[in-house]
Amino acid sequence: MINLNHLSYRYKGGIEALSDVTAEIGPGIHLLLGENGAGKTTLLHIIAGLLFPTMGECQIDGLATRKREPSTLQDIFFLGDSMIFSGYSINDLIGVHAVFYPRFDAAMLRQNLAEFGMTGNEPLNRLSLGTRRKAQLAYALALRTPYLLMDEPANGLDITSKYGLQNMLARCIDPEQTVIISTHTVWDLQNLFDGVLVLSHAHLLLCQPTEVVLERIAFIDDVVPPVGALYVAQQLGRFQGIVQNTTGQLSELNYTLLYMALQSPQRDALLHIINNQPL
């Protein structure tokens, strides 16, 4: 379990990246949303123990990540958006890096690489952005860390590779792992998310399982505006809306529409309903 306790972070110069963030994040694949500069990457760095909070604390299984205990670090892997792997090839990393991760699965790595049409012997510094990203993803998933953090994992991938990544995540991630994926292109992996977090201007607006969100609100797509909608957007002649779920039936979660609604004047009313705190 990831516990964020009144977490704040300020960069030198006083820029506030995170402000009083409190949340519990359990097993599952979680989508992390937010505008540019919202604090998403900063949050991932703090969870990974790469940055230390200015105030508050981040704990993983009861241990503060700022202490960088080996027992904690071996359970976390962070794959950044523009991360550069040391070593000539992925296979070179097995003996010098993967040995620090006790759940590393060499057979899974070989299968992941094969699905991307790779062997692991490719020189990383000579690969294109997309091909290098495929090698990194194959490796990161095969480490099988209990906590996996990924920043824009589909960046640089072509359509076929994005489809392959969906299948790879579904195959490689077990129910006990906690995965947080920060991305602006939610449609690449939208069928996989078990939870959603939304940051805005350093504040955490939402942290809920997708099932809870859908129990409390419903997403409508129709040619006419939905009656009593909490939020409505019009696109290509159709109306997409969010209404309170009064039927108990679960709709499909439209992450883009939810994010847009949380940036609108209707945000507070929507959050009261999602968080089960009626006005």
Image: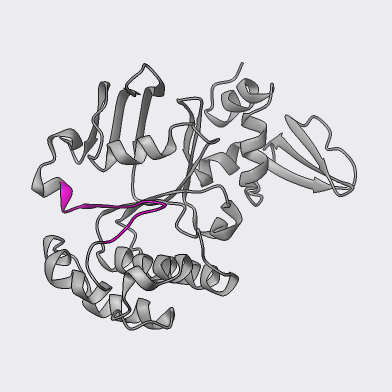
44 shown above or below 88: above
Left or right of residue 111: residue 191: right
Q: Quadrant of residue 22?
A: top left
- Residue 132 magenta-drawn? no
Looking at the picture, does residue 155 appear above or below residue 142?
Answer: above
At x 28%, y 61%, the residue is 85
Q: Main secondary structure of the magenta part?
A: loop
The residue at the point 22 percent across, 35 percent down is 59
- Report the span colored magenta: 73-85
Q: Look at the image and tell me whether residue 1 can be seen.
A: no
Q: Position of residue 206 (x, y in %)?
A: 50, 32
Along the horizontal axis of the image, is 209 left or right of 59? right
Occupied quadrant, residue 218:
top right
**Which residue appears farthest toward the front when viewing the image?**
126
**Count of number-bearing discs:** 0
Q: What is the quadrant of the N terminus in the image?
A: top left
Quick check: 65 above or below 70? above
Residue 189 on image: x %, y %: 53, 59
Q: Is residue 157 visible?
A: yes
Seen from the viewer's position, the closer of residues 6 and 226 is 6
Percent across and percent down for residue 109 are: 29, 75
Residue 157 pos. (x, y %): 52, 66
Judge whether 11 appears above or below 237 on screen. Answer: above
Please name whichever residue, 146 or 208, is drawn nearer the observer in this view of the structure.
Answer: 146
- In front of the other: 51 or 264: 51
Q: Residue furthest left?
A: 70
